[in-house]
Amino acid sequence: MAKEKKKKKAESKMRKKKNAKTARAKSKGKSEGKAKIKTNIGTRGRTFTGKVTRKFPKRITIEFERMVYFNKYERYAKFRTKIHARLPEELEDEVNIGDRVEVRECRPLSKTIHFIATRKINTGEEK
């Protein structure tokens, strides 16, 4: 009888471990951390919106302005930032030069690409 109890305890522990592993694996693929498009690249961190300045196969360059305050001069200065982003196949036909696009940070995909385009906000003609 004691052996049966030990066996049941061991089985229940194994089940719990297995359930915990599958729960962890499922939580890694949450939609919060993924781009809204169908890719295997998870996203994290910062999100930017900018204007598409160049378009390449599977890649775009976006540009946006930011204001930086200088204490010494008590003034703001405008700086332009250029970011290279991966362009998924789903957005390749939609996005053109001049469009506003949202990009989100992801793991480094190459030397210069650390962002992925998640959605097109509007076309270049609209304001």
Image (spheres, rainbow, N blue to C red):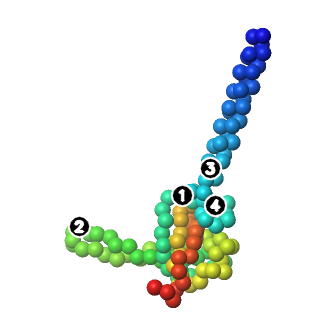
Residue 41 is tagged as 4
Cα gap from disc 1 to disc 3, whole angstroms = 12 Å
Q: Which one is earlier in the sequence, the residue at label 2 or at label 1?
A: 1
Q: x and y percent of residue 93 in the render?
A: 66, 80
> How crowded is the residue under tag 1: few (<14 C-alpha within 10 Å), some, or many (20+)?
some
Can residue 107 be seen at all in this image of the molecule? no
Q: x and y percent of residue 48 in the render?
A: 48, 69
Task: Name the residue tied to disc 3.
Answer: 28
Task: Name the residue tied to disc 2.
Answer: 71
Which residue appears at 78% of the width and 15% of the height? Answer: 4
Can residue 109 be seen at all in this image of the molecule? yes
**Quadrant (top left, top right, bottom left, bottom right) of the N terminus:** top right
At label 3, the amino acid type is Lys
Nearer mark to the viewer, of 2 and 1: 1
Q: Tell me the SS state at disc 2.
A: loop
Q: x and y percent of residue 77 in the render?
A: 31, 75
